[in-house]
Image (cartoon, grey):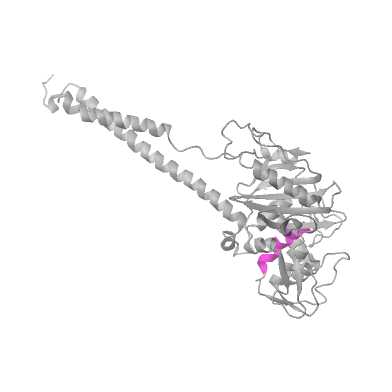
Amino acid sequence: MSTATWSPVRALTAAAVCTASLLALCGPAAADGPNGVDDLRGAPPAPAPAENLLDEHGVQFLPRPGVPEPPRVSALSWVVTDLESHRILAAKDAHRPLPPASTLKTLFALTVLPRFAQGTVRTVSSADLAGIEAGSSLAGLKEDMRYRVADLWHGVFLSSGSDAVHALAAMNGGWGKTIDDMQATAARLGARDTTVESADGFDTPGQFSSAYDLSLFGQAGLTNRDFAHFAATKTARLPEDGGPDASGLQNTNRLLVGSHGVAPYDGLIGVKNGYTSHAGNTLIAAARRGHRTLLVTAMNPQSGAENAVYEEARALLDWGFAAAPRAAAVGTLPAPAPDPTDPGTAQAAHRSPGTALHQASAARAAGHTDDLVLWSFSAAGVIALAGFGTALWWRRRQPAGPEDGGPAA
């Protein structure tokens, strides 16, 4: 066959080889690493395992170019978490056992909220309200009055009402059983620092939690539609359907509603504040901006300023939003394990703030996988075509044998 006849074959082979080379050079980009979207561009390696940093004393932060240092705050313990990636961006004494005050009501809600429909009606009795500690915050429930379960949760989240906690605990089988159930929920979520002695968070000997554990509770709560709704509610009526005995409730989270000299934080979606004389001020605060949701937990600021827990949380949130795109992780919050007692969790979770972001992240990861598979098949096909063309060309270059019509040996 003439050289002219074989020119198309050679051209096809050359094109295929070039295409294969281009595919190899321009294949799918590496997925984002654990330190953020830019962590493959000169990021210092994180210690292995990074989670060990959370057991260390003091502020834990991995410096990187272009990432500011966390603000200096007076809280005894704090954690800043990016909920989309579960990365802990910085922390101070994350596992330090401290009294949690009413932030422990997040664990109470995680435990009890899925067990009763919001429209269920409860007539509050004197037995429901027995045993409330003097000095406890109250929602203002009245004996022999009918309340929907949703009303009681408004009392828990907005007013930190121990009376609402007691009424719901009575529905759950009693105070002692509810404490045991809360401890089981904490164990399921991996909260190793939490010991529950009082379901409403009131100061009780032996009761502790940590900024890490409270962050676990806040993250898990935001995967529950009802929890997320109550945590973000600013005002409500008690009972909600009104009546001559109805009263108004306003959320005591000053960073959410803006009160007592605290400006509301842009994008705040809850979660829960607390205070006792022994615990000081505690706060779990979540805020969303664009496609990013951050969670900050701060425990017992020491500055003495009236609104220190809110302003320090504000500073940590501001830092987190600035640092998150490039910050290296000092640890992670594991994704919350599903509650086996709540068959509706999966259906509700996809609409909640935290889980929606986790699903978006998973979808992007799936997209990277699909691109890799498509690229792999395309590259394999082109390389096979190149090999086939090369084989034909080489075969035509060999002397023809008898089967090809050539001279016999």
Q: Is residue 306 magenta?
A: no
Q: Quadrant of residue 57?
A: top right
Instruction: Tell whether 51 sits left or right of 394.
Output: right
Instruction: Tell whether 363 sits left or right of 202.
Output: left
- Report the magenta stretch's main SS: helix
Q: Quadrant of residue 49?
A: top right
Looking at the figure, which quarter contains the C terminus?
top left
Magenta residues? Answer: 102-115
Q: Where 402 falls versus 179 (above or below)?
A: above
Count of numbered tags:
0
The residue sitting at 75% across, 63% down in the picture is: 251
- Coordinates of residue 117 in the picture (x, y in percent): 65, 71
- Coordinates of residue 238 in the picture (x, y in percent): 74, 73
Looking at the figure, which quarter contains the N terminus?
top left
Q: Quadrant of residue 228?
A: bottom right
Instruction: Tell whether 376 sits left or right of 364.
Output: left
- Coordinates of residue 306 in the picture (x, y in percent): 84, 52
Asked whether residue 254 appears in the rendered view, the answer is: yes
The residue sitting at 44% across, 45% down in the picture is: 370
The residue sitting at 40% across, 39% down in the picture is: 376
